[in-house]
Every structure is written in structure tokens, then in C-alpha cells.
Image: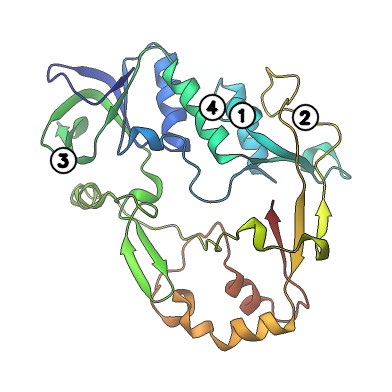
């Protein structure tokens, strides 16, 4: 059930904060157990939004998606409804090191996630920004929204992801945001610090998106999808969406020089970013700086 209004007398068994990958899985898992569950998100229309790379799975990560599916999760099912290029990585090697990966259509994936979330029993979706936690006897017993409305619960699950104290850097500019166009959770982060929780930050180097019609595909290497498609979800036998190719392009000495000559403009090397925590997507300047002896750095672009 979707709700923009909250009944003040409502009390939930579980409140999940954040409607990204982790949030929808946590909320659906809770609701499947019969617990009265609320999923609170900034914007209902952004549930299931793929912010960055529209890929599911890969080496290691594909196994995780399979494990989520074995627990009746929704990510694998949604992927099978949105997959536009499936490949089994390391297919020439043993089964233990293979990794299923699917490039997905972002709109189809979000549509699929919303389908599964909206049909889930015992789950109420609430639009709002959680600004504070209600703490009673050392335990979280609810949340307070930006309009000071209180929602009580027996437990609270935080799945705020990049929105918690979120910061975006574009060259020398920076702005507080969960992702471009969406506000971050600043007050909630401060509250967690007051409660003596440690707040860290994950970094991801997101490359610019390229307009398809500006790319000359004649000079690129085509990477076709697998001929035999293996659905991510154990309950599915086939993938019915037409598959497309990816194309591989390469940097060269000229692009390496341009990046090296201007590396001081990158926040990673200008001193703007001080911490060196875990990082999922290395930026192109990071690759070239760390692997100078490599003649070519490969990047894959999806058509």
C-alpha cells in the first residue's frame, strides 16, 4: 500500500528507511514474515531507481544476487524482467569462479521493482524524510519525519546508502545530495553521531554518460550477449527480453596525457578528498595514475 499520509496512531513492527536496493529487499523480507512493515523513502517514484551503473551481478556480486533470490528476494526476479544483455563471466573456467552479470534497462528494472513492492502484503510505503530516531531505553522505537510527525515501531532498519550525509563532487564543485537532484539525509547522520555510531563514507568514481548518437560504433569491438541465457532467479526458466550488444573502446597515449596533465583537477588528487575508504568504481584518472605501465585501459559502453 502506498501512502503519502500517516495515521498518527499507526505502530509498525518494522520501519525501513530508504527505498534503494537494500531497502526494498529488507522491507519485503520483513513483510513476508508477517510483520507489519513501513518503507519510508524521500520520493515514492524513485523506488528501485538505479543511480549509477545499470548492471546487476558480476564476479562475486552475481553469487550474492543468487543468495538473495534463494531467500525469496526480488532483485533477481526484477533483473529477469529488465535484462537487455546477459553474460556469464569466466564461463571458460570452473563453476566456482563464474559470475552471472546482466546489463539492465533502468526503466524496466524500476518498473519491475515497483511491481513486486506494491503487491507485497503487510507493507506500507510512506513518502517522507526521516530526520530523527525515537530512542527508548537504548533501542530505536520509531522515527520522526521532517514535518515532526512521529511513527512508532518495534525496530528500525537503516538502508540510507549514499544519501546518509551524501556529497557529490564534479571537478572542483561539490554539493550535498543523495544523488543528483535528490537531497541527502544530513540531520539523520548527525543524530546517529550523537548516538555514538561511527559514520563513514564510500566513494565511487562515476564516469560521464555518453549520448549514443555521438559514438562511432564502426571502430569499436562488439561484445555480444550469451547465446544461451541463464535467468538470475531460480523460479524463472527463460529471459524474454531481446538482447543487445555491448561495445569495447580503448584509451590511448593521447587520452592518457590529457588526463595526466589535468589530474590536479580531480578531487581524488587535488586534496579535496582526504579519506581513502572502500571504493567500488575506480575513476578513469585513478586507473591511469595507478597503472601507468599499462599501455591500454579498457572501458565498456552499453548501446
Mark 3 vs mark 4, CA separation in Å: 29 Å
> Foreground: 260 or 190?
260
Q: Vertical placement of 39 versus 46: above or below? A: above
Q: What is the C-alpha distance between the residues marked 2 and 3?
A: 45 Å
Query: What is the crowding at mark 4: few (fewer than 14 residues within 10 Å), some, or many (at least 20)?
Result: many
| Residues at discs 1 and 4 in contact (Cβ within 8 Å) | no
Seen as rendered, the residue at the extreme front is 213
Between marks 2 and 4, how big is the CA–CA gap?
Answer: 18 Å
Q: Going from the N terminus, do you reach mark 1 or mark 4 first? A: 1
Of residues 227 and 163, the one nearer the viewer is 227
Q: Dot 3: few (<14), some (14–19), or many (≥20) neighbours within 10 Å?
A: few
> The residue tagged with tag 1: helix, strand or loop?
helix
Q: Nearer the viewer, mark 3 or mark 4?
A: 4
Residue indicated by mark 2 = 230
Q: Position of residue 144 (x, y in %)?
A: 16, 35
Q: Which residue lies at the image location 34% right of the left edge and 17% below the top edge?
A: 1
> Which residue corresponds to mark 4?
112
Residue at screen point 78% across, 39% down: 96
Q: Is residue 99 left or right of residue 261?
A: right
Where residue 101 sits, quadrant-wise, is top right
The image quarter containing residue 291 is bottom right
Discs 3, 4 touching: Cβ within 8 Å: no
| Nearest to N terminus: mark 3 or mark 4 | 4
- Depicted 294 relative to depicted 222: above or below: below
Residue pictured at 39% horizontal, 53% vertical = 179
Up-down relation of residue 243 to residue 277 (above or below): above
Q: Is residue 98 visible?
A: no
User: Which tag, 2 or 3, sits closer to the chain's start?
Assistant: 3
Amino acid at each position: 500500500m502506498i501512502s503519502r499520509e500517516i495515521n498518527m496512531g499507526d505502530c509498525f513492527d518494522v520501519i525501513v528507511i530508504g527505498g534503494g536496493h537494500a531497502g526494498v529487499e529488507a522491507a519485503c523480507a520483513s513483510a513476508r514474515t508477517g510483520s507489519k512493515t513501513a518503507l519510508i523513502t524521500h520520493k515514492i517514484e524513485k523506488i528501485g531507481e538505479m543511480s549509477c551503473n545499470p548492471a546487476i551481478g558480476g564476479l562475486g556480486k552475481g553469487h550474492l544476487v543468487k543468495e538473495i533470490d534463494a531467500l525469496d528476494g526480488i532483485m533477481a526476479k526484477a533483473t529477469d524482467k529488465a535484462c537487455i544483455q546477459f553474460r556469464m563471466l569466466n564461463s571458460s573456467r570452473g563453476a566456482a569462479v563464474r559470475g552471472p552479470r546482466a546489463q539492465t534497462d533502468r526503466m524496466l528494472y524500476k518498473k519491475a521493482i515497483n511491481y513486486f513492492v506494491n503487491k507485497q502484503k503487510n507493507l506500507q510505503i510512506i513518502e517522507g524524510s526521516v530526520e530523527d530516531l525515537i530512542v527508548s531505553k537504548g533501542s530505536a522505537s520509531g522515527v520522526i519525519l521532517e514535518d515532526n510527525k512521529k511513527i512508532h515501531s518495534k525496530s528500525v532498519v537503516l538502508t540510507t546508502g549514499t544519501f546518509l550525509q551524501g556529497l557529490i563532487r564534479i571537478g572542483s564543485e561539490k554539493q550535498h545530495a543523495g544523488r543528483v537532484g535528490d537531497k541527502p539525509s544530513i540531520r539523520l547522520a548527525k543524530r546517529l553521531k550523537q548516538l555514538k555510531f561511527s559514520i563513514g563514507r564510500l566513494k565511487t568514481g562515476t564516469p560521464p554518460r555518453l549520448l549514443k548518437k555521438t559514438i562511432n560504433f564502426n571502430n569499436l569491438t562488439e561484445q555480444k550477449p550469451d547465446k544461451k541465457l541463464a535467468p538470475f532467479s531460480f523460479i524463472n526458466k527463460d529471459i524474454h527480453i531481446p538482447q543487445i550488444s555491448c561495445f569495447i573502446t580503448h584509451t590511448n597515449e593521447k587520452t592518457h596525457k590529457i588526463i595526466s596533465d589535468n589530474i590536479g583537477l580531480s578531487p581524488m588528487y587535488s586534496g579535496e578528498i582526504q579519506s581513502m575508504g572502500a571504493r567500488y568504481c575506480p575513476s578513469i584518472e585513478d586507473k591511469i595514475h595507478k597503472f601507468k605501465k599499462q599501455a591500454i585501459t579498457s572501458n565498456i559502453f552499453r548501446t
